[in-house]
Image (tube, helix red, strand yellow):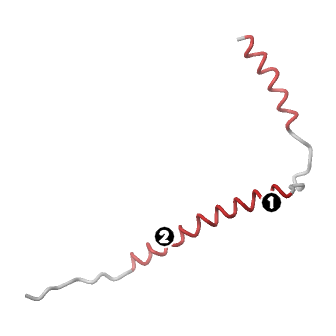
């Protein structure tokens, strides 16, 4: 238990140094690359969803033909 308390006492203050006081506007090229990759994923998910929805709407609004056989 004492070892766990010691480890937590060392790690907890170390996380405070991870924060920086840099302004949020200073994104850099890697932030834009990440956001662009995220946008590609979102668009890639929207295209099949749009195709599925149009097929669903066409299927619901299509008229069904009744086959009648004359004997």
Q: Position of residue 67 (x, y in %)?
A: 21, 83
Q: Secondary structure at mark 2?
A: helix
Q: CA distance from mark 1 to mark 2?
A: 31 Å
Q: Residue at x 87, y 52 (%)?
A: 24
67 horizontally vs 45: left or right: left
Q: Residue at x 27, y 84 (%)?
A: 65
Quick check: 61 left or right of 38?
A: left
**Dot placed on the residue nearer the N-terminal end, 1 or 2:** 1
Q: Determine which residue is flagged by label 1.
A: 32
State yes or no: discs 1 and 2 in contact (Cβ < 8 Å): no
Image vertical order of residue 34 relative to residue 3, above or below: below
Q: Depth-wise, is mark 1 or mark 2 nearer the camera? A: 1
At x 85%, y 33%, the residue is 16
Q: Nearer the viewer, residue 33 or 46?
A: 33
Pinpoint residue 38: horizontal percent, then vertical percent: 70, 59
The extreme top residue here reads: 2
Q: Quadrant of the N terminus?
A: top right
Q: Quadrant of residue 69?
A: bottom left
* Quarter of the rendering occupied by the C terminus: bottom left
In the rendered image, residue 34, in percent from the top left (x then y), is placed at 75, 56
The image shows a total of numbered marks equal to 2
Residue, disc 2: 52
Looking at the picture, how far across and down is residue 27, in whole percent? 86, 55
């Amino acid at each position: 238990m004492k070892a766990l308390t010691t480890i937590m006492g060392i790690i907890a203050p170390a996380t405070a140094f991870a924060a920086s006081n840099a302004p949020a506007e200073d994104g850099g090229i890697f932030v834009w690359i990440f956001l662009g990759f995220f946008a590609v994923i979102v668009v890639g998910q929207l295209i099949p969803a749009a195709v599925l929805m149009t097929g669903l709407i066409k299927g619901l609004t299509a008229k069904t033909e009744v086959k009648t056989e004359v004997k």
